[in-house]
Image (cartoon, rainbow, N blue to C red):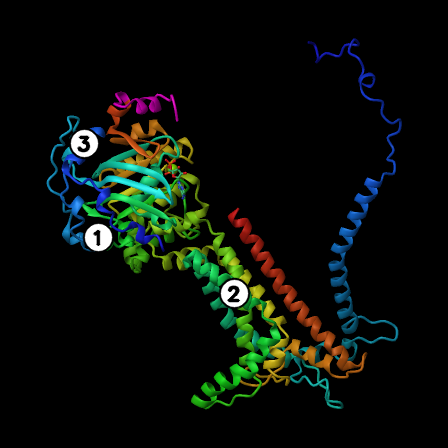
Amino acid sequence: MNAGSPTPAVPTLTAVDAPRSSSLKRRFSWNGAYEKCIRIVLLCCALVSVITTAAIVFVLLYESVLWFPGHTPFFGKVSLIEFLTASQWTPQFAGNQHFGIMPLICGTLLTTVTAGAIGLPMGLASAIYLSEYASPQARSVLKPSLELLAGIPTVVYGYIGLFFLTPMLIKPVLSGVFGLSVDGFNALSGGIVVGMMIMPMVASLSEDVLRAVPSSLREAGYALGATKYDVSAKIIVPSALSGIIASFLLALSRAIGETMAVAIACGARPQLTLNPLRQIQTMTSFIVNIMQGDTPVGSIEYQSLYAVALVLFLITLTMNYVSQWILRRYREAYQ
Amino acid sequence: MSTEQHHSPTPDSDRPPSVGQASQNEQRFPQPEVTPMPNAVSGSTGSLETRRSAGPSLPPPTLGAAANATPDAKRTTKIQTQDMGFFYGTHQALQKITLNIPERSVTALIGPSGCGKSTYLRSLNRMNDIIEGTRITGTVLLDGEDIYARDVDVVELRKRVGMVFQKSTPFPKSIFDNIAFGPRIAGVSSMATLTPLVERCLKQAALWNEVKDRLKDSALALSGGQQQRLCIARALATNPDVLLMDEPASALDPGSTARIEDLIDDLRKNYTIVIVTHNMQQAARVSELTAFFCMGRLVEVGRTKQLFTNPKEKETEDYITGRFG
Ligand SMILES: Nc1ncnc2c1ncn2[C@@H]1O[C@H](COP(=O)(O)OP(=O)(O)O)[C@@H](O)[C@H]1O
Ligand SMILES: [Mg+2]
């Protein structure tokens, strides 16, 4: 067989094959149209999220910084300097309006730090327990209950803070025993319940990164006479540190954005204070409060809502982005 | 750890009930040296925690009954496994392993893959405890003490029986911190103790000259061969008597392999080394004794030279001449 050599004796392909259509041009077929439809529907669904984000960003910018004929944005009426440095936030006090976002940022900081101080260590401890210590039976009980904790509506947490934590725990202990004055609404109760809310999130994200540490490192540790605690605390956690930090940042950005629980438990009085026992207002609870009132659309207090929302958006966006970046780097390190 | 209870002292039925049966085993698997151990059946005399004061509770070594007793017979038996079986759940990975490992020597374990070499090795420092649902039968004695006895401190055992794995496993820490890991978890924290210790271990592992200027650098930046020597140095830092090595050079280039083999040759003076290897030339080069495993059984054990030149069993001959496995 001289199949490789081109000889004229070999019959041409067209002579053997079935006759094919004379034109290369595509023709209409129902199958092709169907394919195209599916493609378009899927694309539209995917685009919804992009469009929504773009629309939200546009609205935020429109009300706070974009000038149009006949439309003055928030920062056209209030200077950025005042916004960032003034110490009072009183947009609803007609005649005595101050627009210093600092009290709101302080409020958010208080609840977030409290939530972090409680939720992050507890979440990490649960993650270590789940990934290093728990027997399969213990896991099968703990995992679903953590998910349940994550599934409780945030309003419920708010009321737990207001009607249980403050009167039955914080007040008896801090004001009963230590003689401190505690407000009925306070940042501490809100911070604690938000801490409980972010704990399952930290636990589940951190558990994933702990489990991703190669088990050969665990074995090497045990082979050196390490106890379970040595292996967890001195090998696994340091190896997974960047992933753990990323999960912390995600959880904190969730705490910053948390609204209902703090609106209910922490009250609605913006104060420039770092005392967690005072009534405060966070950026998010200011936004809900404005929405509840009858603030005229287009007024300066209405627009202040968008300015606050823009700040909030920028903070959480940055934190999410940083944590994603850390997580990505972490994944590369182990693959 | 729910597996602990499975490792409790084995039922008497798994043990050789009489000396007569034990010597039967010895005839089937001629041992290089046979050291009768009265403690073996009745359990250990002292716990591992007290071993340094108590010392090995071995009777003076005697020449074995078997005719092929070797000059090693003058050495004490370091590790003795008797009628050992091992189960992963219901899958029996090892059966009836009776093997004596002499002190300060290199014992090689060879055999086709999946025959249970790693399982055997890992049962000598109870690394298999980590795997859920495993069970061991028979006895494993270290210096005459049953390491699976209820009162044994596994952490102490593992400090005494170090292990090096096939894949090098440096911790993502500095070179210094890697070596200092074992001593630190054992409570040594003063740099005055750690610094010379780290230096000694790195020298013993023939790595000192390459890393002495960058002890603070990450261990992950070392080459594969260097990482493996680092792991050996790290294992030496807990001051073990025994070093278990599971194919320590199988992932390395020939140059690094040669360095590891030289290292093993140096270490044999002070340590009891058990090495699993796929490479029969390597077994021939580094070991004094070789044990051939096949399908979860110990087929033959003998002096390395004798086993490779004049194997007693047909299976061994087939394997070492490359006819199977
Ligand atoms: N973790 C495990 N779980 C279940 N079976 C295992 C496990 N590890 C090893 N085995 C089985 O035990 C047998 C012996 O394995 P191993 O000791 O790793 O062999 P070798 O090291 O000689 O290649 C094999 O059949 C293997 O499938
Ligand atoms: Mg193996």
Q: Is residue A227 one of those drawn in magenta?
A: no
Where does the magenta region start and end?
B309-325
Can I make out residue B201 in this image?
no
Q: CA distance from mark 1 to mark 2?
A: 41 Å
Which residue corresponds to mark 1? B48
Ligand 1 within 8 Å of the CB at mark 2: no
Task: Give residue A55's position: percent from left, percent from top.
Answer: 77, 64
Instruction: Specify the amino acid type for callout 3.
Output: Gln
Which residue corresponds to mark 3? B24
Give the residue at the far front of this rendering: B13
Instruction: Specify the amino acid type for callout 2.
Output: Leu
- Which of the two discs, 1 and 2, sits closer to the camera? 2
Q: Nearer the viewer, residue B325 or A51?
A: B325
Left or right: residue B35 versus residue A47 is left
Q: Is residue B317 one of those drawn in magenta?
A: yes
To which quarter of the image does residue B317 belong?
top left
- Which of the two discs, 2 and 3, sits closer to the camera? 3
Q: At numbered mark 3, what does the secondary structure look like: helix, strand or loop? A: helix
Q: Chain of mark 3?
A: B
Task: Give residue B169's position: percent from left, percent from top.
Answer: 41, 46
Q: At numbered mark 1, what does the secondary structure look like: helix, strand or loop? A: helix
Q: At numbered mark 2, what does the secondary structure look like: helix, strand or loop? A: helix
Which residue corresponds to mark 2? A146
